[in-house]
Structures are given as structure tokens and as C-alpha cells.
Image: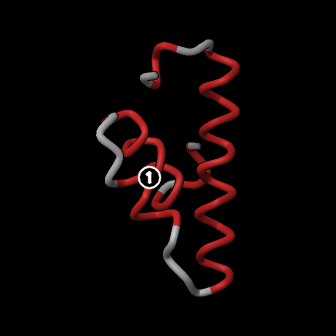
């Protein structure tokens, strides 16, 4: 299922989850979720990860 195939609320929740996962990885000094999100075939998921990683105030 694609990013825009779900409701706005579910997309917002997903973006919050992405940001939390990235922050958790960075705090623990690992990179397990970042590559997973950035390499997703759905470009909007990669975009959510990129924005969450580099612009957390915009996520």
C-alpha cells in the first residue's frame, strides 16, 4: 500500500513513527531504520525519512 493510499491521519502517524525511529537510532549510535526508510520503493516514505532526519522541526 502506498503512502497516499491511506488516510491523512495514518500518514501523519507514520511520519511521527519515522521521526521517532530515526531519533532513537541516532541516540543509540546505530543506523538500522534510516536505510530501511530511505531505500523504500515508495518515494514518499523516503521523503518522510529524509525530512525527519534532516529537518525534524518540519516532520
Please count the marks in the image: 1
Residue at 44% of width from left, 52% of height from top? 37
Residue 9, placed above or below residue 22: above
- Side (left or right) of 1 relative to 58: left
Residue 8: x and y, percent?
62, 16
Most distant residue in the front direction: 1
| Residue under the image location 56 percent in, 44 percent down | 58
Picture layout, residue 22 above or below residue 50: below
24 relative to 32 in the view: left or right: right
Percent from the top left, x then y, of residue 33?
A: 52, 63
Spot occupied by residue 29 in the image (x, y as percentages of width and height):
58, 87
* Residue in view at x 59 percent, y 77 percent: 26
Asked where in the image residue 36 lies, by quadrant, the reply is bottom left
Few, some or many residues within 10 Å of mark 1 (<14, 14–19, 20+): many
What sort of colour scheme is used for the picture?
secondary structure
| x 46%, y 17%: residue | 4
Determine the secondary structure under disc 1.
helix
| Quadrant (top left, top right, bottom left, bottom right) of the C terminus | top right
From the image, tell me which residue sits under label 1.
37
**For the view shown, which residue lies furthest in the bottom direction?**
29
Amino acid at each position: 500500500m502506498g503512502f497516499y493510499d491511506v488516510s491523512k491521519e495514518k500518514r501523519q502517524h507514520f511520519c511521527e513513527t519515522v521521526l521517532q525511529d530515526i531519533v532513537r537510532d541516532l541516540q543509540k549510535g546505530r543506523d538500522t531504520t534510516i536505510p530501511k526508510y530511505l531505500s523504500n520503493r515508495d518515494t514518499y516514505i523516503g521523503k518522510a525519512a529524509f525530512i525527519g532526519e534532516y529537518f525534524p522541526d518540519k516532520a
